[in-house]
Structures are given as structure tokens and as C-alpha cells.
Image (cartoon, rainbow, N blue to C red):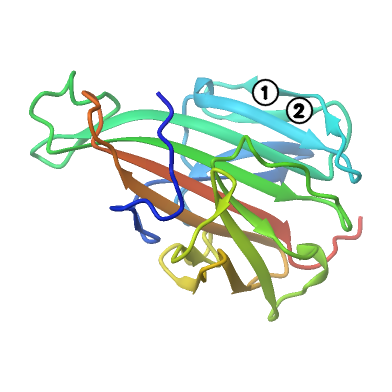
């Protein structure tokens, strides 16, 4: 059941340094690979958990994209070179046992659990200069650049807006270099959901955010977890 996340929901809290894994995409060997990891970790995952993938050209027109589900990860395959790429992963319900182990099941199946949540992970990649951003309604949590991130350059700041179910979200902590420094908070969103995040890398930048929201009346979970990333190259790549 879809849980609504109004902007000023009582009880909403933000955790930018959660131990949960994140999601992003990288171009490797000419492919758009989906990465599930935390910092330098790049872990195997069940490709069936990819719940959606979308790609667009520079003008915001959708490009058909398929998901190649490999044994230990997933690969996105748009029919032509995209300017913008997005992916979603439904990580399912997780329950923590008294001995601090996590099980990929709801608390109805793990009756002695001490903590249970359902997590969803999203990623948005900007791949070409001047790309027109489409509507991002498929991403419940989205980090949206307010200018072309590929033209900012390392050492400067990129203004982003964090949206939760399409609405600006305040007090969201942003990790400016999730792949390299996954515990370093770079900025926090203001009342309009905006923040200025330093561009750290000449190569791939992965900006990330997480939200955790209490859930009532659900037999399987007590909390909903959302993760989202924004990726782009710090400097233009010349082949």
C-alpha cells in the first residue's frame, strides 16, 4: 500500500548517514550498470528487485529502455544513447533480529524482530549537457539539479531541490560524494527544499539523500525508507 508523505508530516525524520545501501548507475565497458552499494562497496543484488527504469533524450522525450537481469546485478539498455536515465529498486521488507541480523522479510514472518522497514531506492543520472529534465513522478524521492550539473565544475556548488512525492522537502541532509565519502554531510535543504552542494569530483559525482518515515497500522513494517541519488560527471568527457 502506498504511504503518502506530505511535506510537514508529523513524525517525519531524516537520516542522512544511514547504514543502508544506496543505488546509482555507472557506465562500465559501454554499459549502464546499476550499482547497489555503500561508499566503495559494490555488492551483488537480486536483479528482480529493479522495479522500474526510464530514459529520455536531450529534449525530454522518453526512450524505451529494457532491464537486463544478470545473476548478481542489473544492466539498463536504452535503445539509443540517453541524455537522462533513472532507475528504481524495491528492496522489500527487512526485519532486524535481537542479535542485530537483518532478514529480508516483514515482521509478520520474523515475530521476534526489533525493527522492521520497507525500503525503496532511486537514482537519476544526467548524461548530456543541456538535457531537459522530464517529470520525475516515478521517483518518490528525487534530487533535482536546478542548473545543468555537467557545466558547474569541481570545486563549485550545484543548487539542487529535493522532492518527496513531488513536493519540496526541508531539512534533508545531502551527501555530496556518496561513493567516496558516504558519511560526509555536504548540505541541508531549506524550507523550499533547496541546497547548494559542492561538486567534489572531476569524474563521477554521486549526491545522495535518505528519508525514514514512521508507518502505522502495517503488520509487516514500522518504518518506510527512501534513498535517492543524483549522478553526473564533474567535467566533460572527451572520447
Percent x, y of residue 172: 46, 62
Q: Residue at x 83, y 69 (%)?
A: 151
Q: Residue at x 62, y 34 (%)?
A: 138
In the image: residue 31, left or right of residue 211:
right
In the image: residue 149, left or right of residue 167:
right
Percent x, y of residue 148: 80, 63
In terms of image quadrants, where is residue 5?
Answer: top left
Task: Kindly check if marks 2 and 1 are in contact, taking CB atoms under 8 A apart as contact.
Answer: yes
Q: Secondary structure at mark 1?
A: strand
Q: Residues within 10 Å of mark 2 (few under 14, many from 20)?
A: some
Badge 1 is on which residue?
67
Percent x, y of residue 171: 44, 66
Q: How many marks?
A: 2
Q: Residues within 10 Å of mark 1 (few under 14, many from 20)?
A: many
In the image: residue 39, left or right of residue 199:
left
* Residue 77 badge: 2
Q: Residue at x 57, y 66 (%)?
A: 192
Q: Residue at x 66, y 72 (%)?
A: 199
Q: Secondary structure at mark 2?
A: strand
Residue 214 versus residue 210 in the image, above or below: above
Amino acid at each position: 500500500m502506498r504511504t503518502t508523505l506530505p511535506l510537514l508530516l508529523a513524525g517525519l525524520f531524516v537520516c542522512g548517514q544511514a547504514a543502508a545501501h544506496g543505488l546509482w548507475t555507472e557506465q562500465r565497458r559501454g554499459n549502464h550498470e546499476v550499482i547497489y552499494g555503500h561508499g566503495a562497496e559494490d555488492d551483488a543484488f537480486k536483479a528482480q528487485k529493479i522495479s522500474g527504469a526510464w530514459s529520455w533524450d536531450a529534449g525530454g522525450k522518453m526512450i524505451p529502455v529494457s532491464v537486463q537481469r544478470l545473476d548478481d546485478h542489473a544492466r539498463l539498455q536504452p535503445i539509443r544513447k540517453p541524455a537522462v536515465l533513472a532507475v528504481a529498486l524495491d528492496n522489500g521488507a527487512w526485519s532486524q533480529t535481537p542479535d542485530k541480523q537483518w532478514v529480508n522479510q516483514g515482521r509478520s514472518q520474523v515475530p521476534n524482530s526489533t525493527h522492521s522497514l520497507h525500503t525503496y531506492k532511486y537514482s537519476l543520472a544526467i548524461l548530456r549537457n543541456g538535457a531537459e529534465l522530464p517529470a520525475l513522478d516515478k521517483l518518490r524521492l528525487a534530487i533535482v539539479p536546478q542548473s545543468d550539473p555537467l557545466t558547474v565544475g569541481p570545486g563549485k556548488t550545484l543548487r539542487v531541490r529535493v522532492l518527496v512525492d513531488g513536493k519540496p522537502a526541508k531539512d534533508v541532509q545531502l551527501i555530496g560524494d556518496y561513493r567516496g565519502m558516504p558519511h560526509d554531510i555536504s548540505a541541508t535543504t531549506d524550507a523550499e527544499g533547496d541546497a547548494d552542494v559542492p561538486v567534489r569530483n572531476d569524474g563521477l559525482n554521486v549526491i545522495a539523500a535518505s528519508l525514514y518515515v514512521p508507518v502505522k497500522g502495517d503488520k509487516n513494517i514500522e518504518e518506510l525508507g527512501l534513498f535517492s541519488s543524483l549522478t553526473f560527471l564533474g567535467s566533460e568527457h572527451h572520447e
